[in-house]
Image (cartoon, rainbow, N blue to C red):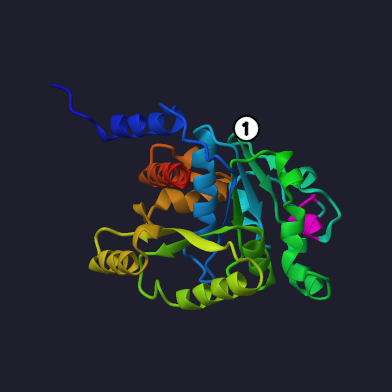
Amino acid sequence: MTGWTPIAEEAERATRVLHPSAPFPRPTRRRMLTVANQKGGVGKTTSAVNLAAAMALNGLRVLVIDLDPQGNASTALGVEHRSGTPSIYEALLGEVSLADAAVVSDQSHNLYCVPATIDLAGAEIELVSMTAREARLKEALTAEALDQISPDYVFIDCPPSLGLLTVNAMVAAEEVFIPIQCEYYALEGLSQLLNNIELVQGHLNRNLWVSTILLTMYDGRTKLADQVTAEVRRHFGDTVLKTVIPRSVKVSEAPGFGQTVLAYDPGSRGALSYLDAAREMAERGAAKEEVAK
């Protein structure tokens, strides 16, 4: 009797990613999520692009707005972001429309990205002197502008800081998505992020709330990862997705090839985990809307 080989198992997993059996449920209204954590190296950009790609591969239309001057989300989605490319920088200044700056990723016809160029690095200084400086992104993300792209989900990938760009993202969106790594000091600095969210809620955007927390870089070989997971779930309850993203070499390698892990190695554990997390987000969103009705 022939055994189930690792190669056959990986091929079966890749088939699950590339040839989904059923599309994800579509939200009844557009969901816009600010992906934020001022602590670097927590899988923020990685989570934003891979969740977006997973949703796009499963029938949803998704827009990623790269609000980080490093442009890592643009790189992972295979989108041009050299200086001079129409980008979120020009959209913030009102020089181009959002639709003119958005381009289709080569990884899915359902996946759009508004890239970030190095010009964005000076944007925080330029914004300081502008009127309604905290609302520049909101002004660019009007319903009319978004309707030209017609996304079901919008992910705004923020820089690893709590500066003016991140505040703009929080003013523009209703939901905050926080990735937390399953490592020591995971909760360090999180209180400052939550304080900032409360300040934005109180003064600039009453509708803002933390809708989703995703645990990343989980290493099942360590007791510490389980302790961090338990601690986060105890603090935040059902806001935390059941799916946990494992520490994965493939997930780390993918951006170097200008790809998400779902394109780079669709049979890997990392790809499947992001697929499961995206499905859980889509199903939770649809279920909440049904309850609201």
Q: In the rendered image, is residue 88 in sight?
A: yes
Which residue appears at 45% of the width and 41% of the height? 290
Q: In the rendered image, is residue 161 in sight?
A: no
Q: Residue 167 lies in magenta, yes or no? A: no
Q: Is residue 63 above or below residue 43?
A: above
Q: Helix, strand or loop at disc 1?
A: loop
Viewport quadrant of the N terminus: top left
Total marks placed? 1
* Quadrant assignment, res 186: bottom left
Q: Name the magenta segment's main secondary structure.
A: helix
Residue 136 lies, in percent from the top left, at 76, 62
Start-end of magenta stretch: 85-92
Badge 1 is on which residue? Answer: 109
Q: Residue furthest front?
A: 293
Q: Which amino acid type is marked by label 1? A: His
Q: Foreground: 133 or 82?
A: 133
Left or right: residue 90 compared with residue 104 = right
Q: Foreground: 253 or 129?
A: 129
Residue 70 lies, in percent from the top left, at 65, 61
Residue 159 lies, in percent from the top left, at 61, 65
Which residue appears at 40% of the width and 29% of the height? 15
* Quadrant assignment, res 19: top left
Q: Is residue 253 above or below residue 193?
A: above
Mark 1 packing: few (<14 Cα in 10 Å), some, or many (20+)? some
Q: Residue furthest top?
A: 1
Residue 42 lies, in percent from the top left, at 47, 64
Left or right: residue 104 compared with residue 125 = left
Q: Residue 87 lies in magenta, yes or no? A: yes
Q: Is residue 17 above or below residue 156?
A: above
